[in-house]
Amino acid sequence: MSKDNKSTAEIDAAEVVSIHDIGPPPLEEDYVNPADKSPRWLLGAHAFALRCMAGIGFHLGNRFSLPPPAPTETIWLDSTLSAWKGKQTISVSVWIPPESPQRPSTTKRPAVINFHGGGFILGQGTDDSRWADALVSSLGAVVFSVNYRLAPGYPFPTPVEDCVDAIVQISQLADRYNIDTDRITLSGFSAGATLATSSWTVLQDPKRWTYEIAAPLPKIAGLVLYYPSLDWTLDRPQKRKACKRPDLTLPSGLTDLIDASYLHPPLPRRERTDIRLSPGLMPDELVDRLPPVHLCLCEYDMLLAEGKLFAERLESRGRKVSVRVVEGEKHAWDKPMPLGPKDSVAFEYDISIAAIKSWIDGI
């Protein structure tokens, strides 16, 4: 590390400490992730096994309840920002509302661009089919759920770059889908909520990372974030200690795999201040430009503290933010497998949709 880079890291670390007013105190030493020593092919094999298990789980879950509607179509977008560029490399599942006699065909629709969860190593756009169906039914929105490329094959920052590419290119398809580019909302679950927030930060100043994005950049009406990870400068043991029930948080074997897969090569925690990685650490100047934000958090989640801290920071800066904490539930409570969804899921989805409606109706 050069002297200049070291100074920057020290300044960033001081800024990080200044906003961590809740949660456990910093550890004296970084957590040593044993998965960082694993070869990339082995991490990939473990991730592939988890993807297979998750696919089976969603299949079984749909057998216990009415399966959600399948996407209307799938489109393919280009990777222009990542080091791994290519034509038609990012697939997107699309749900299009049926035409209604009460709605003139010339009336432009709102749109929601969604990013699935899975710790950056598994998951797919159709994991959020029930969320998409609720948006289509309640808002008449066109829903796009992005299949960004996954770690460990595509570590940070490629998933962020794929999501930014998707937002820009979907907005350019506004005429094709008859959507109002002033009423585009971003949503995401877990890792996807992180990516939604990170993507918004990139769109505010692409040249900060030497990204070349054709103008005009899309305007985002709001962010709906389900249990996001917002601060990678906190190690997993710190996050667990901040939780009421550490025993109910994601197991260390899984989080070790996630972290080693996504963050490659490894970075000391005090150097993880890139706001594409830790969007909760965005400077005040960006906080002051945030559109309305709705956060849905889980009581027994290691990510609860940083989510609440982010909401408090937004509120202190006068931003429009609403927060829900689902009591007695763990991370990703809305996707239980193999059982069907809980009643609280539809309830929280409805509250999120009401927030979106209030944002777009005011435009």
Image (cartoon, grey):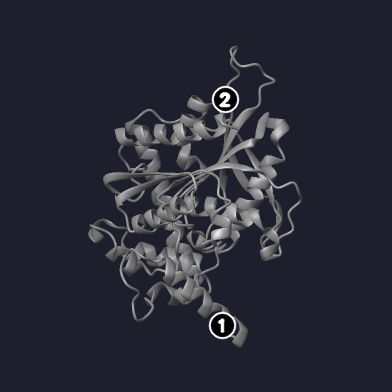
What's the residue type where badge 2 is placed? Pro
Give me the residue at 35% from left, 38% from top.
61
The answer to which of 214 and 259 lies nearer the viewer is 214
Give me the residue at 66% from left, 61% from top.
82
The answer to which of 308 and 339 lies nearer the viewer is 308
Secondary structure type for disc 2: loop
Closer to the eye: label 2 or 1: 1
Q: Where is residue 176 in the image (x, y as percent from the top left)?
A: 71, 31
In the rendered image, the residue lying farthest to the right is 214
Give me the residue at 26% from left, 45% from top.
327
Residue to which mark 1 is pinned: 7
The answer to which image quadrant residue 363 occupies is top right
Disc 2, disc 1: CB below 8 Å? no
Q: Is residue 19 visible?
A: yes
Residue to which mark 2 is pinned: 97
Q: Does residue 5 sit above or below 302 in this rendering?
A: below
* Number of disc labels: 2
The answer to which image quadrant residue 253 occupies is bottom left
Q: How crowded is mark 2: few (under 14 residues within 10 Å), some or many (20 or more)?
A: some
Q: How far apart are marks 2 and 1 (CA)?
A: 52 Å
Secondary structure type for disc 1: helix
In the rendered image, the residue lying farthest to the bottom is 3
Q: Where is residue 138 in the image (x, y as percent from the top left)?
A: 48, 26
Give me the residue at 71% from left, 65% from top.
210
The answer to which of 61 and 146 lies nearer the viewer is 146
Q: In this view, does 342 lie to the left or right of 312?
A: left
- State the quadrant of the N terminus: bottom right
Q: Position of residue 305 (x, y in %)?
A: 34, 58
What's the residue type where badge 1 is placed? Ser
Q: Which of marks 1 and 2 precedes in the sequence?
A: 1
